Structures are given as structure tokens and as C-alpha cells.
Amino acid sequence: MQVEQISIFIENKSGRLAEVTRILGENDINIRTLSLADTSDFGILRLIVNDREKACGVLKSNGFTVNRTEVVAVEVPDRPGGLSAILQALDRESINVEYMYAFVERCGENAVMIFRFDETAKAIETLLNNNFNILPGERLYSM
């Protein structure tokens, strides 16, 4: 039910993001979706890629700090209020969304959002109990 995401800590300076993408590209690693958050000194690049093991290895060998995190991919009804319905279901159970970002492809009539929760197991149970579809990692890695 969870998706493995890699997080790369990069200096907030010209060329560092290009270096990460160059390294991944040269190693035939496909970026499925990403999110970049920054401060004045550093950024956190969060990626879902087709080959997590290889990506972590080549980035670490090139001097990057890389962590793995579990996130949840949820189909969001692509209509006004679709995301709100998911967030309200989570709020009723006092589940905090630490961050979220969109996946680049649609899944049928729905969009796909990536979520990081403070209580992942409880969030998954809540979403399933409210009839929201959670996508398995293998489906995202190969989309």
C-alpha cells in the first residue's frame, strides 16, 4: 500500500539539481514524479523513480545524502472538491498531512496525489474505509 520515495539533500546553488538529474539519466533511472522544497541554504528533492536501489547507490557514490521514505499514492477524483473529500476524511481522524504533491499521470478519470502522513497506517485505513483507491508502488514505478 505504500510507495518508496527517495529524498536527496542538495545545496541551494546553481547546477546541483542539474547534476542530480544528469546522474540519474546517465544511469537509466526514470523519474516518475518529484517535488522540490528549498530554503536559502539547501533543498530537499523528493523523487519516485523506477529503480530506487540503483538511484540511491549512484547518488550516494556521487556524494549526495539520500534517504528513503514511505509515502502513499491516492487516486483523487478529478472534479471540484475531490481533494477536499480526502482531506476531510483524514481530518475527522486527526491525521496530519506532512506534505503532498501531484503525480504527473492520470489514472483513468482520477488524478494521483502523493501524501506523507504522520500516521501512515491509520491514514491508509481511513482512506480505504472511505472508499478511496490507494495505488501500489509497483504500479507507479512502471507507469
Image (spheres, helix red, strand yellow):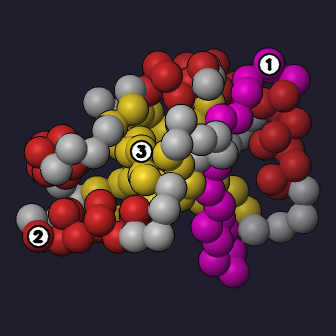
Give the residue type that dot 1 points to. Asp
Q: From mark 2 to mark 1, how far is it between C-alphas?
A: 43 Å
Q: Nearer the viewer, residue 51 or 77?
A: 77
Q: Residue at x 62, y 30 (%)?
A: 49
Q: Is residue 99 above or below residue 54?
A: below
Say whether marks 2 and 1 touch (CB < 8 Å).
no
Q: Nearer the viewer, residue 55 or 94?
A: 94
User: Mark 1: which secondary structure?
Assistant: loop
Residue indicated by mark 2: 92
The answer to if 143 sits in the magenta stretch is: no
Q: Where in the figure is residue 2, as x and y percent of width and height?
A: 33, 34
| Mark before the other along the chain sequence, 2 or 1 | 1
Residue indicated by mark 1: 28
Q: Residues within 10 Å of mark 2 (few under 14, many from 20)?
A: few
Q: From mark 2 to mark 3, how far is it between C-alphas?
A: 19 Å
Q: Where in the figure is residue 63, as x and y percent of width and height?
A: 71, 40
Q: Which residues are magenta?
A: 26-43
Mark 1 or mark 3, which is nearer to you? 3
| Mark before the other along the chain sequence, 2 or 3 | 3
Q: Is residue 114 above or below residue 85?
A: above
Q: Nearer the viewer, residue 19 or 63?
A: 19
**Is residue 52 at least partly visible in the picture?**
no
Q: From mark 1 to mark 3, how far is it between C-alphas?
A: 28 Å
User: Mark 3: which secondary structure?
Assistant: strand
